[in-house]
Image (cartoon, rainbow, N blue to C red):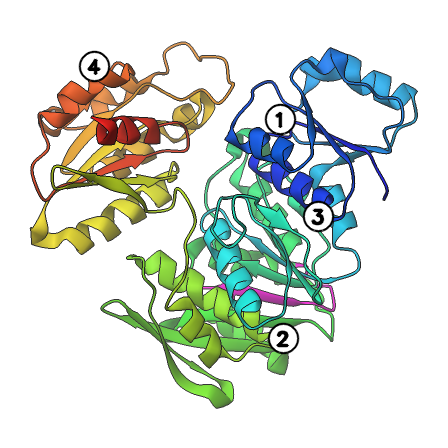
Amino acid sequence: MKGPILFLGIGGSGMSSLAHMALDLNIPVLGYDQKNSETTAFLVERGASLQNDISKIPLDGIEMVVYSSAINDKHKQVFDEIKGKNIPLKHRSEFMHLLVSNQQSISVAGSHGKTSTTTMVSQILSEVGMDPTIMIGGDTSLLEKRGGKIGKGTFAVYESDESDGTFLKHKASIRLLTNIDNDHLDYYKTRERLEDAFFEYMAFDSDGIAVLYAHDPGIRDVLLHKTKNISFSPNFHLYLCMEEPDTKSDWFLKLKSKLADQLIPVVYRIKDDTLEFNFAEFGFLSLNLPYPGIHYLTNGLVAVIGAYVSGVSPKLSTEILSRYIGVKRRQEVLGNWKGITVMDDYGHHPTEIAMVIRSLQNKLKSKGRLVVLFQPHRYTRTQLLLEDLAKSLAIAEILFLLPIYSAGESPIPGISHESFIPFLKKENTQFLDGVIEKDLVSIKSKLETGDMLLCLGAGNVRDWGLQLLKN
């Protein structure tokens, strides 16, 4: 590829990562996005050209057009013009495969935790000098705001996004899976179709390797119900991270009888803030992370095994993860205001919300209270998951609810943040207007020294925390 390459929707996390990778290869980059942002400004700083009006994009001389699923029917005229000029049109997942076609790929998928797990694997391989190509759907200091980079090593590590089904276009020989949960049902429509997609992702008929967190109920269901009548490749290997009772279950014993030595269980237990596991000739190893929460530990175990099948000793990997660098917007401390810690977290699905609230409550214990400021994400997700979201939010001692962050969606009649009213206790829940300065008056009236304010959601909820710190 010589370029220039046009990226439609270049400001998105996945698209901007790919654009940075193209710039690493000295390929000229032209981008379109409706809005300017820190992300697009950094791309321009690195040499990309940016256009906010899609009708003014010069198509002459463009070698390839890369688009994301955010580019939809509203842009049909531009797509027709591109096709009329016979310019190759690639979805971002296809372009990702082009970039890493000469490397051995490690993909990381899952309803939750894939960004953190991808970062963990990338940090391990980077610190041992393997210089991997990396693509992460989040901001981490490992990549210095870039989201993606081209490495000179043998491996490419990337996050596989299941939201639109295109993660099935990735052709990784090593596949990691953290969990399966009810998310993106606006796309999949049914749980069964969602499970079918993840089952296909596992690629049991390939000659590759899959590393699964098999204690997850969603993954267990797929292993139980969808592996009965399939033929495994004789060169396929399956690593299952699981607790001791899992090894005595019917689904595991049946799977073990089919795969024999191709199935490798990695048995772990969690004690306090430590995950202990027994693995092959390495014996018992311990994993500790700088972040609280069982989900971080289990994601870390998947990352350690993913690094192991890539050639890194588990003992070395656990040592590296003891100083895990983390990802922006995942339990990110924004600052301290009058003795109150202000934290931001991207969690927006019921499972993620419950995990982060519980882990931080356990961390605080008697030191202070956890005050949650939650911003629902998308009207469709709120409508589909309303009761489950409410159950997770009900764990909070003190809860503030912001209006729904639309993420470009049109409002749905009858769906708003006030739809939660029937499901939450009135005495510890307050519904806000979405006007930052006005909302902060209400929030500050509830805060006490030693508390933690958790800004929770995938939208711009962190802006409330940042404004509080400015005050």
Residue 24 numbered mark, or none: 3
Q: Secondary structure at mark 1?
A: loop
Mark 2 or 1: in front is 1
- Give the residue type at disc 2: Lys
Whichever of callouts 3 and 4 sits on the residue coming sooner in the sequence is 3
Q: In this orientation, does residue 248 appear?
A: no
Please tell me whether residue 421 belongs to the stretch shown in magenta: no
Whichever of callouts 2 and 3 sits on the residue coming sooner in the sequence is 3
- Give the residue type at disc 4: Lys
In the rendered structure, which segment of residues is drawn in magenta?
203-214
Residue in front for this viewpoint, 270 or 228 = 270
Pointer 1: what residue?
A: 70
Q: How many marks?
A: 4
Spatial distance from mark 4 to mark 2, Cα to Cα?
Answer: 62 Å
- Give the residue type at disc 3: Asp
Residue in front for this viewpoint, 445 or 183 = 445
Residue 206 location, quadrant: bottom right
Residue 438 numbered mark, or none: 4
